[in-house]
Amino acid sequence: MEFAKFAHAKSSSESVPSWRVAKLAAAMGAAVLVLTGCLATTPQSNGQSATVGTGSAGGATATGANSKLESCPATLGTIRIDEQTSAGWYATYASRYGTGSTLPVLRLLIQQSNCFIIVDRGRGLAAGNAERDLMRGAEGRAGSNVGTGQIAAADFTMIPEVIVSDRGGTKGGLAGIGGLLGGRAALLGAVAGNFSTNEAGTVLTLIDNRSSVQLAAAEGYATNTDFGGMGALFGAGGGAGASAFTSTPQGKVLMASFADAYNKMVQSVRAYKAQTVKGGLGTGGTLGVQGGSTAASKEVDQAAKPVPATPVKKKPAGT
């Protein structure tokens, strides 16, 4: 609005007050600085979240949880999370994308869902063991109530794994849109000419600790598009700054994929029906082999035995 007034006044040969010129110049300068990434604002939370895991959890109470998070009406048991930090994918993605541990957000989602109670088998357990050793020693205060037999068993183990993680896999593709639509579409063409897609595919597996039987498995997927390209408006330096501010950390995409997998798993375990095998689990199954010792194998041997020929009765002579 100020720019329009300024242009009109200049074309009408009117005198422009110096204060208006100064105000307009300051506003335009600030806008350029912000768009080129040369100006930063004070960090604020504003109730937002860094990932799909939002809010908090305390016991069975969840506050500010993601509205799309699935939940259970009753807790199904205790669970530990095995992050598989020794797996090849973990080190690869951590070094390539700077992603951190998957545990904090998964633990938040699990507790908020009320489906499982988490038992710590990582740093929390190590710290607890150190504290128990200290309290049971000569320096421990009497009445600390740090006795044996207090650690809860984990009924289940959840294993998170990354199957696909690609940052910036698809780039550009719409750079010519500005030329097709004319000069007035230069801004659209500049933005569309520099975009990239990020995607992640993950799998969560749920294991019964007592039998080692797999109870559930779920696949998750997430994708997003990053838009850059403002450098076409402000030059090479400005473009670099704008692209940096519009780049999505791959960790956000990974956690969105894990959240998707967890929601799918919750839907399955809420309607869980145990798989059963004739004769019981681990007793040989129903697929037998010839010469085997299982019940199914004995059935195979029995079926393979030749059927004895039925003797033909001879008719009495004279009949």
Image: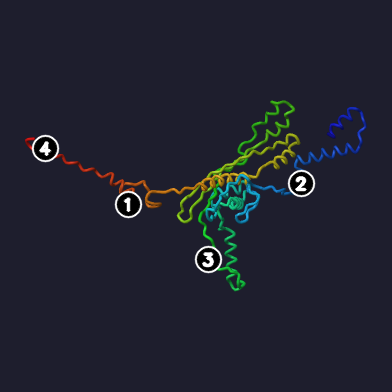
Name the front one of labels 1 and 4.
4
Instruction: Pinpoint residue 156: horizontal percent, then vertical percent.
Output: 51, 54
Which tag, 1 or 4, sits closer to the chain's start? Answer: 1
List the residue tagged with mark 3: 149
The numbered dot on residue 293 is 1
Q: CA distance from mark 3 to mark 4?
A: 84 Å
The answer to whether the residue labelled 2 contacts the one labelled 3, judged by CB atoms less than 8 Å apart, is no
Q: CA distance from mark 2 to mark 3?
A: 52 Å
The numbered dot on residue 41 is 2
Which quadrant of the view contains residue 182? top right
Secondary-structure class at tag 3: loop
Which quadrant of the view contains residue 150? bottom right
Q: Nearer the viewer, residue 216 or 247?
A: 216
Q: How is the image coloured?
A: rainbow
Which tag, 3 or 4, sits closer to the chain's start? Answer: 3
Residue that appears at 54% across and 67% down: 148
Residue type highlighted by circle 1? Ser
Q: Nearer the viewer, residue 162 or 132?
A: 132
List the residue tagged with mark 4: 315
Which tag, 2 or 1, sits closer to the chain's start? Answer: 2
Identify whether 240 is placed above or below 83. Answer: above
Which tag, 2 or 4, sits closer to the chain's start? Answer: 2
Which tag, 1 or 3, sits closer to the chain's start? Answer: 3
Q: CA distance from mark 1 to mark 3?
A: 42 Å
Residue type highlighted by circle 3? Gly
